Image: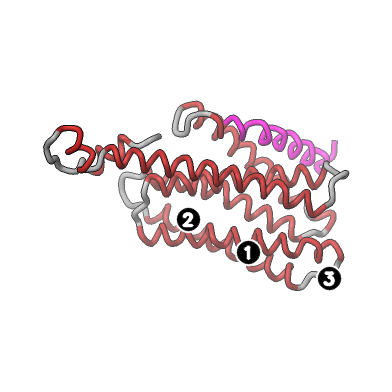
Amino acid sequence: MTSGSLITWLHIAAGTLVLGVAPAAMLVRKGGSNHRRWGVGFISAMVVVLGTAAFMWQPHGHLFLLLLDCVCAYLVFQGYRVIARRRRKRPDPRADALDLGAAAFVLCSVVALFVLACTARTPLMRDLAPILASIATIAAIFAALDVRALGARVQTKLGSLLVHISAMIGAYISAVTAFCVINVHSVPMAARWIVPSFCGTIVIGAFSTAYRRRFARAARRHSPAAAAASSGNFSLMPTPNRLESSLPK
């Protein structure tokens, strides 16, 4: 077996694992042991997928595939790091520098994607130009939010959770899109790129709405007015630690 075929088979095996593991991580309770277990499996499989994909674009000379690989890698990285930063007990300049470096790296990839979209010459690149520009815009927004969060040094539990969900599902959308583009030949090329993103955006929106409502209900239950109404007396606002510990996991 040649090195090229070995890389291809590793890519296929890890990609198949990603397609099955990610839904399991999404369906179990967030923050629980099962979610963390499935999440580790998803990240590990994605590392193999992205690492092998970094070599597979060369035979066809499609540089945009390498750049999309970089964007997807950043989404996985950010989805993990935003939770790690939230759990951090004290400032860590080295970790912050790593996060800033990753944001700068993906911004370079974003600029390159915009250049490819604006200078498309082949029919394939002209068809993909709007899609590449859209992906670049989304990646730029994620990087900007990450830089902003690092500068503020204060991240709410809800905000971190929504970024985590959006980034991880965004990475999963990339894997599904790659599968559709390569294997679903009966569907027009544009649909293979657009439909997974459309469906994934709906899923992200549903998760975001559900968690915003859950956090809002938890905050109302622990507001001074709610406490006064339940006891007949005015009471102090719960401390931040008590309030946060009562919010949904």
Residue 99 is tagged as: 2
- As rendered, which of 109 and 232 lies closer to the eye? 232
Q: Is residue 171 above or below residue 26?
A: below
Determine the secondary structure under disc 3.
Answer: loop
Q: Position of residue 197 (x, y in %)?
A: 67, 49
Q: Amino acid at mark 2?
A: Asp
The stretch of residues the image draws in magenta is: 1-24
Q: Residues within 10 Å of mark 2 (few under 14, many from 20)?
A: many
Q: Position of residue 226 (x, y in %)?
A: 23, 39
- The quarter of the picture where the N terminus appears is top right
Determine the secondary structure under disc 1.
Answer: helix
Sequence-first disc among 1 and 2: 2
Question: What separation in Å lies between label 3 and label 1 (alpha carbons)?
Answer: 19 Å
Q: Position of residue 181 (x, y in %)?
A: 79, 47
Left or right: where does residue 59 sit relative to residue 217?
A: right
Residue at which label 1 appears: 110
Question: What separation in Å lies between label 2 and label 3 (alpha carbons)?
Answer: 35 Å
Q: Quadrant of residue 71?
A: bottom right
Q: Residues within 10 Å of mark 1 (few under 14, many from 20)?
A: many
- The quarter of the picture where the C terminus appears is top left
Q: Amino acid at mark 1?
A: Val
Residue at which label 3 appears: 121
Question: What separation in Å lies between label 1 and label 2 (alpha carbons)?
Answer: 16 Å
